[in-house]
Image (cartoon, helix red, strand yellow):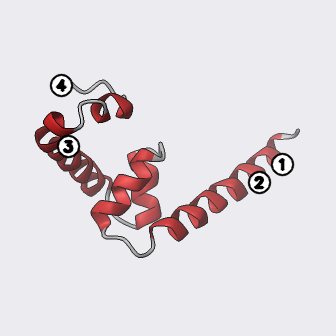
Amino acid sequence: METKQFEMLMKKLDTLEKLLAFNIIKDKTVTEQVDILTKAGLRARDIAEILNKTENLVYVTQSTLRKKRSGSSAEQLPAESTEEGGGSSA
């Protein structure tokens, strides 16, 4: 596959990814949107682009979600913290 064809294919896949993500998150709050897209494995930069928000907002929201999970769900759902990966210090 030539470089130009590969770039065109990647651009179309990126567009498809954004459309699918938007369809899943369209009726959610920004916090819920960030949570869903993070769990789907998207990078903060990609989440920010999909949501038309800043990367900083995404990082802050992700941090807030991690703190909320570690504080309230650590006692209730100990297995949940291991599912996320990401090397957080628990």
Q: Label 1's element?
A: helix
Instruction: Please tell me which residue is depicted at 26% across the width and 48% down the height of the picture.
Output: 62
Furthest-right residue in this view = 1
Instruction: Please tell me which residue is depicted at 43% across the width and 53% down the height of the picture.
Output: 37
Picture quadrant where residue 19 is located? bottom right
Foreground mark, 2 or 4, reads 4
* Circle 1 residue: 5
Left or right side of 30 for 52: right
Foreground mark, 1 or 3, reads 3
Q: Which one is in front, 37 or 78?
A: 78
Q: Label 3's element?
A: helix
- Going from N to C along the chain, the mark reached first, 2 or 3, is 2
* Circle 4 residue: 90
Left or right side of 29 for 51: right
Foreground mark, 2 or 3, reads 3
* Circle 2 residue: 8
Q: Which one is in front, 7 or 12?
A: 12
* Circle 3 residue: 69
The amino acid type of the residue labelled 2 equals: Met
> Label 2 vs label 4: CA separation?
42 Å
Furthest-bottom residue in this view = 27
Estimate how packed mark 1 is, as few (under 14), some (14 to 19) or many (20 or more) residues with alpha carbons within 10 Å: few
Mark 1–mark 2 CB contact (< 8 Å) = yes
> Label 1 vs label 3: CA separation?
43 Å
